[in-house]
Image: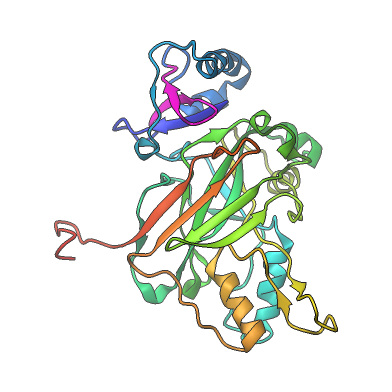
Amino acid sequence: MKFASYQDGSRDGQLVVVSRDLGQAVYPSHIANRLQQVLDDWNYLSPQLQDLSDQLNAGRARNTFAFNPAQCLAPLPRAYQWAHGGGFGSHAELLQQAQAVDPSVPQATGLVQASSDALLGAQAPLVCANEAWELDFSAELAVATSDIPTGCTPERALDGVRLLLLANSFHLRAHNNADAGTAFAPVAVTPDELGEAWRKGRVNLSLQTSWNGRKVGLCDAGPDMTLHFGQLIAQLAQHRSLRAGTLVGSGTVSSPARVREGKKSAQDLPDWPKGYHCIAEKRAMELLQSGQTTTSYLRVGDTVEMDVKGRDGHSLFGAIAQEVASVVAPGASAASA
């Protein structure tokens, strides 16, 4: 199944069921109105929603309409909690190597709590209060869980994965990686939508990131994931239980470097053929290759896009497509800001 939350003037949005190709949608108002409601009562509501989803994909559902990603909030516009990081060891390793060259390189973090009271939609502006704060994007995958008991095993935690999501978490690198918010792709999907691509707690599909229209990253998010989602959830639940609707993210999707072909030794400079999914990684690569950085962090007017394609070639979650905007003072127009 695929779910989205349409803007309806409320803080949580109106639940819609979306077709597999993201072409059509239907309101399941006779079943549920909010996605959190579904997560709270999954065993009772999900079979009913599955029937509606099957009808929608077979072209038999009534009162359908064309799905419009621009109308979407985040699938869960506010969540009980949002914790992310630590899933890709190569991300931490790259930044640590660069820190040996320049101690000012931002430090990679493990699983950390982030704000979850106002999660953003896929086309919401990415607000930059001050360019000197070094605003950075970060492409990552995430899951929404069921209730998870304290001290559960990674295997038990995987059974509690209800939905998969695509996220862009942004950070202020000049402020010790301070959380600057998170945007989510329009659609959350159940793991069975991925078929064999969902395996051992990993999404075995390619994630593409573009910056100002130029593709900068194309990583397979599965094989290079060091800690799978079951392990990340279990880590978060080590000392306390988790409520249904908890969001857990992988951290920046990353791919290990390799020595360039033709080089004679492992001491030679590495290559990153799959690119990067945050600017901090790009700058770390530059430090290791030339001893200095040339890439700036985000500027007002920049655009960032992220997408994951399924094995059928269709966008799995819908794309994240954001533009960096400046802060407009209350009462001022954008033109005068």
Q: Which residue is drawn at 14% across and 65% down?
A: 336
Magenta stretch contains residue 26: yes
Locate residue 113, reporting x and y percent: 57, 54
Q: In which quarter of the image is residue 233?
A: top right
The range drawn in magenta is 13-28
When the figure is inspected, residue 54 is found, relative to residue 308, above or below; the finding is above
Q: Is residue 140 left or right of residue 170?
A: right
Q: In which quarter of the image is residue 278?
A: bottom right
Quadrant location of the N terminus in the rendered image: top right
Q: In this view, does 295 lie to the left or right of 284?
A: left
When the figure is inspected, residue 219 is found, relative to residue 17, above or below; the finding is below
Quadrant location of the C terminus in the rendered image: bottom left
When the figure is inspected, residue 91 is found, relative to residue 1, above or below; the finding is below
Locate residue 33, reporting x and y percent: 42, 21
Q: Nearer the viewer, residue 267 or 163?
A: 267
Q: In which quarter of the image is residue 89?
A: bottom right
Picture mark count: 0
Can you see residue 153?
Answer: no
